[in-house]
Amino acid sequence: MVQQPDLGEELALYAAGYRHIAGLDEAGRGCWAGPVVAGAVILPLDRPDLSQQLEGVRDSKQLTPRQREHWYAIIKSAALAVGVGIAPPDTIDELGIVPATRQAMALAIVQLDLPPDFLLVDFLNLPELSVPQKSITSGDALSLSIAAASIVAKVTRDRLMVQLDGRYPGYGFARHKGYGTRQHRESLDRLGASPIHRLSYAPMRLMLQE
């Protein structure tokens, strides 16, 4: 059964006096190519119909592309603020994927129109930020704000990969979005690495060594 994220964490914090609680999640950590993208979403927790309005919002991995696009538009309309942060492949190669993901999340927070007074973060913590925060394992399955952020991050990244497919044809980025599919591996064997491949990741690193 698909788990329905709820507002339990958010409403407990709201009752404690926090007002602008941002959910944060990322998309693309495991990809061989393209950026890692973070989403940040602040929901209007004083709206009594909020849970009903976002009833179909789930962890983005549990939704089809069409469902994600549908809920992305609704989230953008309903949220008090939405932010996106992007860490490109060269940053991932230089820093490593976890620091690069943290950087993308920090950038997403900067892009919010409202400064958050609390962060709910999927899996990671952000020690470089002074904002009070809580890391939640599988947060995108539990917290509605984090689930909304996961959709924002995924839709934004998928759209970017479709654009990059036009710039770097032959790799199938529009189809596999940079994940390590058989088609992707075959295109790498045929064409070599593109400028948006993560050279520190094993398939590209081994290719360069050979």
Image (cartoon, grey):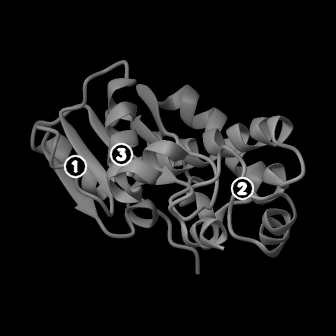
In the image, what residue type sits under mark 1?
Leu
- At which x and y percent is residue 20? 26, 31
The answer to whether 203 appears left or right of 107 in the picture is: right
Q: Secondary structure at mark 3?
A: strand
Mark sitting earlier along the chain (1/3) = 3
Disc 1 versus disc 3: distance between alpha carbons? 13 Å
Residue 126 is labelled as: 1
Mark 2 element type: loop
Position of 12 with respect to 198 (left or right) is left
In the rendered image, the residue lying farthest to the top is 113
**Who is closer to the viewer here, 27 or 141?**
27
Which residue is depicted at the point 72% across and 49% down? 194
Residue linked to disc 3? 23
The earlier-in-sequence mark between 2 and 1 is 1
Task: Please name the amino acid that badge 2 sits on.
Answer: Ala
Question: Which residue is the site of mark 2?
Answer: 193
